Amino acid sequence: MGEYDAAVPELEREENLIAAAKQIVRALGSKRNLTDDAKKILAELGTQLTTITTISENEVDGISDDEGRLNVNQEKIMIWETDQSMIWDLGPNEANEYINSADEVRKLTEKLEAMCLKDDGEKELLRRAHDVLQIAMARLEEEFKHMLIQNRQPFEPEHMSFRSSEEDAGSVASLGDESFEESQHRDSVSRNSEEYIVDLVHPYTIPELRCIANLMFISGYGHECSQAYVSVRRDALDEFLLILEIEKLSIEDVLRLEWGSLNSKIRRWVRTMKIFVRVYLASEKCLSEQIFGDLGTVNLVSFAEVSKASMLRLLNFGEAVSIGPHKPEKLFPILDMYEVLGDLLPDIDSLYADEAGARVRIDCREVLRRLGDSVRAAFLEFENAISTSTSTNPIAGGGIHPLTKYVMNYLNALTSYRETLNFLLKDQDGEDTMSLSPDINPSTEEENAREGACDGSPLALHFRSVASILECNLDDKAKLYRDASLQHIFLMNNIHYMAQKVVNSNLQSILGDGWVRKHNWKFQQHEINYERNTWSSILAILKEEGNSNSSRTLLKERFRNFYTAFEEVYRTQTAWSIPNGHLREDLRISTSLKVIQAYRTFVGRHTNQISDKHIKYSADDLQNYLLDLFEGSQRSLHNPHRRS
């Protein structure tokens, strides 16, 4: 006993010296101004100190192997409880030592739990082992979170300008505006440029993070590890959305937004979604797999928990947009949202393939369905807005009505969404679900062919319906003009504009050549009717009836009546407008051929019967005056003059 009693104090002194030496090494190692060589020497010294043989059962009778193991590893673990340094910041040796000690305690705990413990001392040993393991796991959780935070890498793809001022531009004009923006801006980032993985955490830390995760899970502390990971990565994801200026908005918040602000946020949402899903979330899932890949489905659950809230927030915005008022100007932004979300559906299904991601998959499809319904409703509202558009004052000069420009440019812009609209404008059985204008509902194959409806697609049917509704509205607007000739000028201008807009755009492939031919014929008929209404009665003055030998007095009266009528047409119709140069020139030529030929013939026939002083204008004068018609600037011929 005497030798044992003497040995114990000696061993205790050795243990105390070793512990003190370790403290000194650790304190020195935490200093920032040490050279690399000094750090290396201290690390080697620390390793040698940990290998010094401690008390074992062979040296001290009465202390078991298990208790000795626990004592040794407890010391290594507990010494860090008074140290504020982060173990993994001090280097791999310290980190490995701590991991090994924690793993030793875990193994010891499992061994003791597997034994039938009856002795109070053994039960106390198991309780101590549990306490030490819990302390170690708590420390590993802190280290795990610290490494995730300190080694996080910023994410902002270089090819994306998230703060572009373009996001606030390009809004759709309202129905009453002068014209519709012809070129709708659509993002066209290629799919390949969107699909790549970035390192959200420095790669060299991944093995350490995986090591901690594996140890915590096999020690029964997997939930704590997962929650630590989720909390850190969820904060990182929220920060990323903050960089993108994606606000947290409730459905009520979205519904209260003014259109300009809402349109800007929709554009930002559209631009964000592809990068967010295909790059950021793909990278997030990769990180989760790298850390938890050895632990079954833990990586899938962790990824879902990290990203689910943010994904649902983005989807909630889509839902809020879909249930708002279905104004025509919302159709294009909603179509963009629908196409982006539909395009991302396979990616989202792949990212959230397991049960943990079922909510995201289901909500994504529901929002896509709601956006599709909103597209249909907005298109119907567009048709209704055309049919109910009323005017109290006619367009000056019978020019092209703003409604005509708006509708045709609107339809032309919609051709970019051809496939999507063809899908959405029919029901699941492929039958059209939306009401068509009754006069364009094709009932026979012959009618289809005449309208150029080769494919009979839903989009073609609805576009022809819209065009028909527009024409009916234009007919009503033409009645605002008291002058029948001006009514024909107005309809000629507007139908010609419609036909030309189709010929010079993608609309021709949808409405068909037959539609173009029909409307070319229509505006030409209005041209003919204009000439008949304007000039028939005037030319009748020059028409010879019965005896061509009219009295001089009657001839003077006929010349006077013709000049008066011509001057009135000149005064009135110089104020009329035909904006299209070719159409204006065609009508002038056609009119000139009829009027000048009739006038020359009349003058030539009666040259010998009436003096030159009664011939107010020569044929060349009249021909020149006809060139002033339809310029939209009123002139007068009250003061007779001849042009040189």
Image (cartoon, helix red, strand yellow):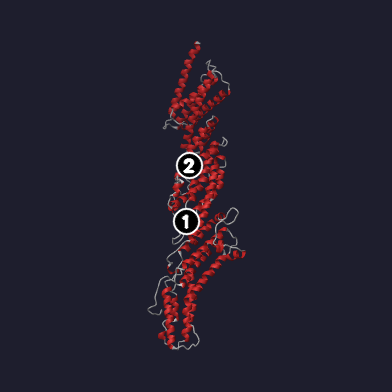
Residue 437 occupies quadrant: bottom right
Q: Dot 2 corresponds to which residue?
A: 237
Asked whether residue 251 appears in the rendered view, the answer is yes
- The amino acid pointed to by label 2 is Leu
- Image coords of residue 457 (percent x, y): 58, 59
Q: Which of 107 and 456 lies nearest the eye of the viewer?
A: 456
Residue with the most extreme right position = 445
Residue 329's disc is: 1
Number of residues whose C-alpha sits closer than 10 Å to that of mark 1, classed few (under 14), some (14–19) or many (20 or more): many
First reached walking from the N terminus: tag 2 or tag 1: 2
- Image coords of residue 59 (percent x, y): 53, 16
Helix, strand or loop status at disc 2: helix
- The amino acid pointed to by label 1 is Glu
Q: Which of marks 2 and 1 is in front?
A: 1
Number of residues whose C-alpha sits closer than 10 Å to that of mark 2, classed few (under 14), some (14–19) or many (20 or more): many
Q: Which of 508 and 85 lies nearest the eye of the viewer?
A: 508
Depicted 629 relative to depicted 87: above or below: below
Q: Which of 419 and 40 lies nearest the eye of the viewer?
A: 419
Q: Which of 59 and 591 lies nearest the eye of the viewer?
A: 591
Distance from the alpha carbon under mark 2 to that under mark 1: 33 Å
